[in-house]
Amino acid sequence: MEIAPENAVLKYSGNFMQGSYGNNVKGKAKIYEKDSVFTLAFDEAFLVNNGPDLYVYVSKEQQPSQFVSLGKLKSVNGAQTYTFTSVVNFDEYKYVVVHCQQYNHLFSYALLQK
């Protein structure tokens, strides 16, 4: 099970919602900061249905067109973390999305709030 770094500060969080191609979606997305490094963590309750070519993005919009990719979705359920390798303005990039890159289908999204 992957969890946020010890002593990291919770900056933003949001509940995962169903996208056009997702059902049985559950869980929370949380952004933590420690030593100027940001980490995205999905909680243990995270669940999304499986699909091809699923990626994790932070996006300016619910249906991503302007986004930063954090890589392939590690698992369709359970706790997992993704580390940001570049600086992201979370006031603009306020959605965490699980997205099928190949077919441009939105599976799930979470609106990040302070």
Image (spheres, grey):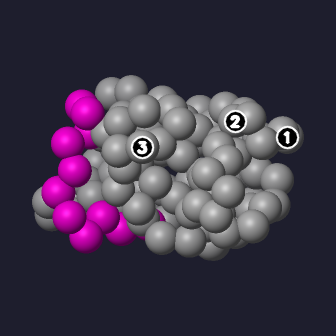
Question: Is 83 contained in the magenta span?
Answer: yes
Circle 2 residue = 19
| Residue 86 shown left or right of residue 41 in the figure | left
Residue 7: in sight, yes or no? no
Q: Percent x, y for residue 69?
A: 41, 62
Residue 105: in sight, yes or no? yes
Q: Percent x, y for residue 15?
A: 59, 33
Between residue 21 and residue 23, name the one nearer to us: 21
Residue 24 circle label: 1
- The mark closer to the camera, 2 or 3, is 3
Residue 65 circle label: 3
Whether the residues at callouts 2 and 3 have beta carbons within 8 Å, the answer is: no
| Dot placed on the residue nearer the N-terminal end, 2 or 3 | 2
Q: Does 53 sit above or below residue 41?
A: below
- The mark closer to the camera, 1 or 2, is 2
Residue type at the position of mark 3? Ser
> Which residue is found at the position 59% from the left and 61% from the top?
101
Residue type at the position of mark 2? Gly
Q: Percent x, y for residue 56?
A: 52, 58
Between residue 88 and residue 9, name the one nearer to us: 88
Element carrying mark 1: loop
What secondary structure prevails in the magenta region?
Answer: loop
State the image quarter where residue 55 is shown: bottom right
> Which residue is found at the position 26% from the left and 33% from the top?
92
> Which residue is found at the position 62% from the left and 72% from the top?
74
Whether the residues at callouts 1 and 2 have beta carbons within 8 Å, the answer is: no
Residue type at the position of mark 1? Asn
The total number of labels drawn is: 3
| Dot placed on the residue nearer the N-terminal end, 1 or 3 | 1
Question: Is 85 contained in the magenta span?
Answer: yes
